[in-house]
Image (cartoon, grey):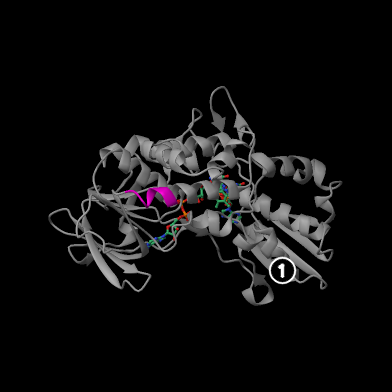
């Protein structure tokens, strides 16, 4: 089957955010949707993070899975037992491993791609051009020997995801190997990546969720199969936890929760580290006090490390080439504006029909204390899309 020449919307990416977009657009009954992804298997969550403990409770994954009518139709027509029944049996108030969430996203995706209003295309969007009629012509590099195809649409929604950020350090890269954060977050792969018998000192940079889980996995490794592993923990701010206030959560998006929070409180706080099990293999390198002190600490402590893993946030994956009447739109000139889920140019003019969602294009939220955060999480994507997508 070839894709239609014209459709109501093109959705790029089939991670949790792309799925949530398609569910909402179907509910809004816009017409035919072309959905593009190389795999249709729940994005990075399934590829990389199945072994990660969630920092949100099961109930929120359930709320995501039942938030749109098309999702509910998939659930009711999927033979049991399935990923939904498995998740329904878990304690809804607790966290779970992300393989449960990934399996739910895959099962929903499998059902949604079979719907008449959806044309699922295995491939990558390489470019999209907006013409003077406000129509996007989207170029798709098909897998499955389909070659290149084009489809035009008034709506183009980018749900293209993000990958771990790597930043330069003030010590030459030659003295240590970089260790991919995704590997450190996957204990089964980590164990075969680090040598077992020779001593390895691993530098971990950061103090947010990813950093704490990286420390947790490395401590487990040192405690079990890799007794010669030592960790140097480069951190520039105190541990920060989510706090449950009256009806809202302080540091909902940046504070530690779930297993990472428990581990940090019990073993990594200064009051605990000197006596904890983690403290036996972790040396904390205090990088607070500004860039000069941070640089000095790196210069002093990094050369003795064999590996460096940075857990310093996530960066948007490369977007397809975007053009305006054949002229390349520089990405620096595009501003993501989550108030309406779209983009503006340098002069504040809205780019017609271009939208985004997910970890790459999250909603900017302000809490009752005025703190600004980016809302990243399954149910947060859904809440955001319920608000903005009816206007698309
Ligand atoms: C380690 C980690 C743990 C997390 N834990 C939780 C949690 O416990 N609870 C929670 O609610 N949230 C969690 N999140 C946050 C968030 O829910 C996930 O990051 C989620 O996977 C983001 O989904 P996404 O769809 O935006 O991106 P992705 O999952 O990265 O999906 C993007 C998709 O787009 C595709 N794509 C990219 N470019 C193109 C192109 N040009 N053409 C076609 N396809 C393309 C990719 O192949 C991919 O399939 C976690 C995030 C991380 C990093
Ligand atoms: N299921 C889970 O448990 C889990 C695990 C990982 C991630 N996640 C989710 O994924 C998203 C991203 O989380 P994240 O923990 O990877 O990152 P993050 O929340 O974006 O935080 C990035 C951290 O890196 C620090 N940082 C940035 N640049 C740095 C540098 N050059 N040197 C040292 N520190 C630096 C920041 O500190 P400053 O404030 O000092 O800049 C900040 O604490 C979040 O939504 C999170 O909930 C969930």
Q: Answer with left or right where residue 26 lies relative to residue 94.
A: left
Of residue 350 and residue 389, the one placed in the foreground of this image is 389
Q: Pick the quarter of the image with the N terminus.
A: bottom left
**In which quadrant of the rendered view does residue 297 lie?**
bottom right
- Say which residue appears at 26% left-offset and 68% top-offset: 149
Q: Which of the two residues, 39 or 230, is positioned nearer the viewer here?
A: 39
Can you give x and y, in whole percent of width and height, for residue 279 in the image? Answer: 82, 51
| Residue 187 image point, x, y percent | 69, 59
Work out whether residue 373 can be spotted: no
Reading the image, the residue beneath label 1 is: 192
**Quadrant for the C terminus in the image:** top left
Question: Which residue is situated farthest in the left direction here?
Answer: 133
Dot 1 beta carbon under 8 Å from ligand 1: no
Residue nearest the viewer, comparing 229 with 250: 229
Residue 174, percent from left and from top: 65, 77
Counting other residues with Cα less than 10 Å from the Cα at mark 1, is it few (<14), some (14-19), or many (20 or more)?
Answer: few
SS of the residue under disc 1: helix
Q: With respect to residue 106, does 340 lie above or below?
A: above
Taking the view exactly as shown, the residue that stands out farthest to the right is: 275
Q: Is residue 112 magenta?
A: yes
The front one of 376 and 153 is 153
Residue 55, x across and y down, in percent: 61, 42
Q: Which residues are magenta?
A: 110-115
């Amino acid at each position: 089957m070839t894709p239609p020449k014209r459709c109501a919307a093109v959705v790029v990416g089939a991670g949790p955010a792309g799925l949530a977009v398609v569910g909402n657009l179907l509910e809004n009954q816009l017409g035919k949707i072309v959905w593009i992804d190389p795999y249709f298997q729940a994005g990075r969550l399934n590829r990389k993070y199945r072994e990660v403990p969630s920092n949100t409770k099961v109930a929120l994954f359930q709320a995501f899975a039942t938030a749109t009518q098309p999702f509910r139709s998939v659930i009711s027509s999927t033979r049991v037992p399935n990923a939904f029944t498995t998740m329904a049996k878990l304690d809804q108030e607790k966290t779970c491993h992300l393989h449960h969430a990934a399996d739910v996203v895959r099962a929903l995706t499998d059902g949604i791609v079979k719907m008449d209003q959806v044309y699922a295309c295995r491939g990558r969007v390489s470019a999209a051009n907006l013409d003077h009629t406000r129509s996007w012509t989207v170029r798709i590099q098909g897998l499955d020997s389909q070659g290149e195809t084009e489809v035009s649409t008034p709506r183009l929604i980018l749900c293209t995801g993000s990958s771990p950020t790597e930043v330069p350090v003030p010590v030459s890269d030659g003295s240590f190997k970089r260790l991919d954060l995704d590997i450190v977050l996957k204990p089964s792969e980590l164990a075969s990546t680090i040598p077992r018998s020779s001593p390895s000192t691993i530098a971990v940079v950061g103090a947010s969720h990813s950093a704490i889980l990286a420390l947790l996995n490395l401590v487990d490794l040192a405690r079990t199969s890799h007794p010669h592993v030592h960790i140097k923990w480069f951190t520039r701010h105190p541990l920060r936890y989510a706090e449950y206030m009256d009806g809202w959560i302080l540091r909902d998006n940046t504070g530690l929760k779930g297993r990472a929070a428990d581990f940090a409180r019990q073993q990594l706080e200064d009051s605990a580290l000197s006596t904890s099990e983690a403290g036996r293999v972790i040396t904390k390198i205090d990088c607070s006090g500004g860039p000069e002190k941070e640089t000095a600490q790196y210069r002093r402590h990094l050369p003795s490390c064999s590996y460096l893993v940075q857990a310093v946030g996530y960066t948007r994956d490369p977007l397809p080439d975007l053009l305006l009447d054949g002229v390349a739109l520089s990405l620096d000139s595009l501003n993501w504006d989550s108030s309406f889920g779209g983009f503006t140019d340098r002069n504040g003019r809205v780019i017609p029909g271009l939208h985004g969602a997910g970890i790459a294009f999250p909603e900017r939220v302000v809490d009752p204390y005025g703190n600004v955060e980016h809302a990243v999480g399954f149910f947060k994507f859904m809440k955001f899309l319920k608000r903005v997508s009816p206007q698309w």
